[in-house]
Structure formats: C-alpha cells, structure tokens
C-alpha cells in the first residue's frame, strides 16, 4: 500500500497537518479498500499552531525516522522565520534522493527550500509570504499566482486550503479522475477549483493607483480561445503594454502572457478530463490554435502529451 508520511515539525500549522490525513484516508479503490496508509511522523511532542498562536500539542506514535519508508512525504506549513532542524532537512533530502514524492503545504515550501529541493524549480507558497520565499531563496522560481505547482517529484501548494487541491491532484495522478472525484465528494469540495491564488491576493499597487486587475483577469479567462496578444490585453485594461506588465508583476507576480498560458493549460486539462472533444478542438477552444502548439506546451509544462494525459485522467 502507498505510504504517505506527514511530517509534524515544531510549530506545525494544525490545519495544514490534518489536510493530507483527511484526504488520503478518504481515498477508496474501486473495490472499496483503502488506497493509502498515513503516518504522522514527529521528532517528539510538538506544538501545533493557528496563525502562529499555539493551539494544541501533538504526540505521535511515529517518529521522524518512520517516514523513511514513505512513498510520499508531505511537509505542512510552519513559521517561515523558524529554521528547520538539521535532522528534518537531512531526512527530506534522503527521501527525495531515494525517489519519494515530496510535497509541501503553504509555508512548508520554506522547509523544502531550506533542504535545497526547490533550487532551480518553480514553486509556490501562501501569497502573503511569496516575496519572502523569493528573497530568502533566490534560486527558487516563486509563482504566487497559482494554487499549486507540480514539478514532477517535488510539489508545492499555496495557502492553507490549497493543500486540499494539491492532495486531490496527487490522488488524481495516482488513481485517476474518477477516484479523485469520489474523494472530493467524500470531503465535500470541488474536484478541481478554477482560478488560482491570484483571486485571493489583496492587491496593493506600490505607486498608489487603486485600479484593480480583477476585470482584466476575468476578461482574459472568458476569452481563452481568442488569439490574445499583449497589446489586446493592454487595450482592454486601458494601459500601455509596459504599464500592464508592471502592474501584473506587482499584483500577480508574473507576466500577463504567462498567466494566460497557465489558464489555457488548466482549461485544456479540464476538457481532456471531462469531455470527449478531440484534441484539435480543445487546442482551438483554449487559444493554442493548433495541436502542435498544445503538444509543445503540454510537454514543457505538464510533462506528457494531451492524449496520454486524457488516457490517465479521463473520468
């Protein structure tokens, strides 16, 4: 059985800690048997927090070394200002080197970064501390606009509830869309939320302009199938292309065209999972224009082909 180890480090965010336990324990194979074994692994009795306030204490049956058998290890959030213990960092590095899937929830990304697992990788964390992650670990490509990032063996999620999205994504990868949908129903949430973390960000323009990008993001989302260029988006926003790019960087943490590409890929994945539309029609509906262009971006950002993705995840 696939073993999931959830690391309870000192100061662990209580909500983050329980998310993978609840999600993976809810997964059932088609024959009704559990799909995962879950262990909460703690070095000793640790303090769990909520908004950095002590909430309760945890004493687990499993120590950190019991995580060494894990197929998947998950690091819930901790205080970004609290350096992880060297023993925990060594364990995480060893697990990754041994081929385990390693994921973080919210500020758990700081632990993965401290272990060196995010160097040269795209990653995310809670939008409120994304700038701190990028500043503290400059070799990490921090994207604060998404709910989670799947970079193959290493995965990271945004703030708090985005851990649910990440865990369901891993279930979908392991067992397919149908099992993930059944699990989502069991925990009473959508199988896959639309949009990214950007919709929750409190936008603050450093130059004091109070206009918001919300209408522009909504318009872009509604026009994914159109051949949008930076000039088209800027015209809709009544800005110059340079001003638009500056506002996107300040508020969303990425460029307009990168945000658009992420939304197009997300929509293409949804259509591949949930419809019988041909790959050619999906390429047109999502603004890629051709199957070749869709294949190129799928290979680069998803790591597979559209047809292979459909075979794996179509419900």
Image (cartoon, rainbow, N blue to C red):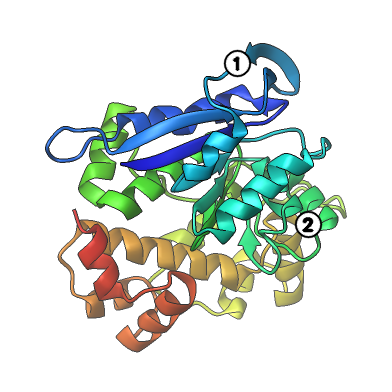
Identify the image quadrant of residue 275.
bottom left
- Is residue 160 in sight in this rendering? no
Question: What residue sits 25% from the left and 58% below the top?
Answer: 313
Q: Where is residue 277 in the image (x, y as percent from the top left)?
A: 18, 69
* Residue extending furthest toward the right: 207
Report the number of discs.
Answer: 2
Name the residue carrying label 1: 59
Near mark 2 (Cα within 10 A), the count class, few <14, some 14-19 or many ≥20, is: some
Secondary element at tag 2? helix
Q: Position of residue 104 (x, y in %)?
A: 58, 45
Question: Would residue 204 be found to the left or right of residue 75 on screen?
Answer: right
Secondary element at tag 1? loop
Q: Distance between the residues labelled 2 and 1?
A: 33 Å
Q: Where is residue 21 in the image (x, y as percent from the top left)?
A: 44, 29
Question: What residue sits 71% from the left and 46% below the top?
Answer: 89
Q: In this view, does 15 lie above or below 297?
A: above
Q: Which of marks 2 and 1 is nearer the N terminus?
A: 1
Marking on residue 104:
none
Name the residue carrying label 2: 134
Question: Would residue 60 be found to the left or right of residue 213 on screen?
Answer: left
């Amino acid at each position: 059985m696939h073993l999931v180890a959830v690391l309870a480090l000192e100061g662990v965010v209580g909500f983050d800690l329980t998310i993978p336990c609840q999600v993976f324990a809810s997964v059932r194979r088609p024959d009704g048997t559990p799909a995962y074994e879950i262990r909460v692994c703690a070095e000793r009795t640790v303090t769990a927090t909520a908004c950095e306030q002590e909430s309760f204490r945890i004493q687990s049956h499993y120590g950190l070394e019991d995580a060494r058998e894990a197929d998947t290890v998950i690091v819930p959030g901790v205080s970004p200002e609290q350096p992880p213990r060297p023993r925990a960092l060594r364990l995480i590095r060893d697990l990754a080197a041994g081929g385990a899937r390693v994921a973080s929830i919210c500020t758990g990304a700081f632990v993965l970064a401290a272990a060196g697992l995010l160097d040269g990788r795209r990653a995310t964390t809670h939008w409120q501390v994304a700038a701190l992650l990028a500043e503290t670990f400059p070799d990490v490509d921090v994207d604060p606009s998404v709910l989670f990032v799947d970079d193959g063996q290493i995965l990271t999620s945004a703030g708090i509830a985005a851990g649910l999205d990440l865990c369901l994504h891993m279930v979908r990868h392991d067992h397919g869309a149908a099992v993930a949908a059944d699990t989502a129903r069991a925990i009473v949430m959508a199988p896959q939320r639309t949009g990214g973390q950007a919709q929750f960000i409190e936008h603050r323009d450093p130059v004091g302009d109070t206009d918001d990008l919300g209408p522009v993001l909504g318009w872009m989302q509604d026009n994914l199938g159109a051949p949008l260029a930076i000039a088209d988006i800027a015209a809709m926003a009544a800005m110059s292309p340079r001003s638009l790019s500056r506002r996107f960087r300040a508020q969303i943490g990425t460029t307009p065209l990168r945000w658009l590409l992420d939304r197009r890929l997300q929509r293409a994945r949804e259509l591949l999972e949930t419809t019988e539309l041909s790959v050619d029609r999906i390429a047109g509906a999502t603004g890629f224009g051709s199957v070749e262009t869709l294949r190129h971006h799928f290979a680069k950002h998803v790591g597979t082909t559209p047809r292979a993705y459909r075979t794996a995840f179509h419900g």
